[in-house]
Image: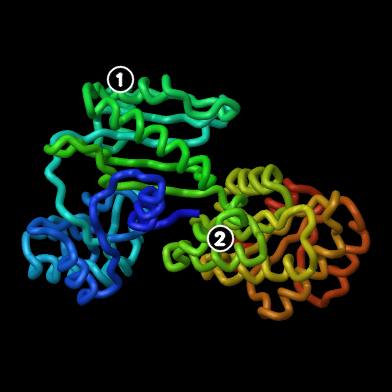
Amino acid sequence: MNIHEYQGKELLAKFGIGIPAGVAALTVEEAVAAAKTLPGPLYVVKAQIHAGGRGKGKFKELGPDAKGGVRLAFSLDEVESNAREMLGNTLVTVQTGEAGKQVNRLYITDGVDIAAEYYLSMVVDRASGRVAMIVSTEGGMDIETVAHDTPEKITTITIDPATGFMPHHGRAVAFALKLTGELNKQAQKLAAQLYTAFTSLDCAMLEINPLVETKDGRLLVLDTKMSFDSNAMFRHKDVEALRDETEEDPMEVEASKYDLAYIKLDGDIGCMVNGAGLAMATMDIIKLNGMFPANFLDVGGGANKEKVTAAFKIILSDPAVKGILVNIFGGIMRCDTIAEGIVAAAKEVNLSVPLVVRLEGTNVDAGKAILANSGLAIVPADDLGDAAQKIVAEVKKAA
């Protein structure tokens, strides 16, 4: 689960981490009112979307010469004009793709006199089973570019969760950032605070870019991105309440209501599979046969008829889907349950695209019988290869 920058900063502030003063706004009037609460005379107007690269992004509606999604304003009038240009328009960045994201929220912050910029992030390192703290003196830049061009400027410090954050970790962070004196002490303290925030909130990723040194000798979080382990949100109802569903694909939001693992893709063959590995193999074999999957959808091992019906309807709600491949290996999952869900959903939505179903495993004969007696134009398949060939042929025939 992702949240907006201003929400992330509010969470970090609870752990004693320094952030510039700022207020979120949903309208132009709220943006101006927010600026009036700040010291000024320099303000920063920041578009709030779940994507990086906002400053270098472009608004579709404003032309190539317009400013991006992070702008300086030197008066209340400039705050107002920038807010009016941003709200309701579509910001395209390197992370949004060509479709971009509509800006529905702004964050108005106080200006900061910057002396230097640094990079600091934390992720779970699956290879070591530890938390990795990644730091660099090259703040304000795309970390991917730094990693490619000057990898020696990136330092990774791993922290064993069994021992937690230790003083030597903080010293390593300050040393990597080449900080001395009071700033060195601040960096050590900040690193400990960030680790506490990361583990306490069950974060999957916490990125600060840039972390800035101000001209009066303070370290402040100027921008942050945070994402969380969705499986841990039952422990953090306050964080779960920060979810902004307008930033997510509507079909993925609907799938989450039924605990379905669904990701929208760019292809034209809808897939419904049980098991992540089988789902990946199904997508691969569709591509091997010359077409592309429209989604990743894992219904899980313990799905019931209602869950299967919901999954099927979500696939069919995608206008790009020209055919559907259902590939089920019934271990815990029963094939007759899958079949009942498919038939119920297909009848409810008036199925109009080709459907190929491959069933194997528990109650497979009962499942096949349900499909055969449904009165629907369902094409059975014997194995995965046969299923992929048949769905591709059916879609091409229907085109």
- Find residue 257 and report its horizontal and vertical position in percent: 62, 67
**x and y percent of residue 56 in the render?**
22, 49
Q: Position of residue 230 (x, y in %)?
A: 57, 52
Neighbour tally class for label 2: few under 14, some 14-19, many 20 plus, Cα within 10 Å: few
- Residue 242 visible, this angle: yes
- Amino acid at circle 1: Phe
Counting residues from the N terminus, which is met first, the one under dot 1 or under dot 2?
1
Question: Is 5 displayed left or right of 237 in the figure?
Answer: left
- Displayed quadrant of residue 64: bottom left
x and y, in percent, of residue 297 in the image = 64, 56
Quarter location, residue 253: bottom right
* Residue depicted at 35% across the width and 32% down the height: 189
| In front of the other: 138 or 323 | 138
Residue 237: mark? 2
Q: What amino acid type is highlighted by mark number 2?
A: Lys
Side of 15 where 332 appears, left or right: right
- Distance from Cα at disc 1 to Cα at disc 2: 37 Å
Image: 181 above or below 13: above
Q: Which residue carries the number 1 mark? A: 175
Q: Which corner quadrant holds the C terminus?
A: bottom right
**Which residue is found at the position 25% from the left and 46% from the top?**
222
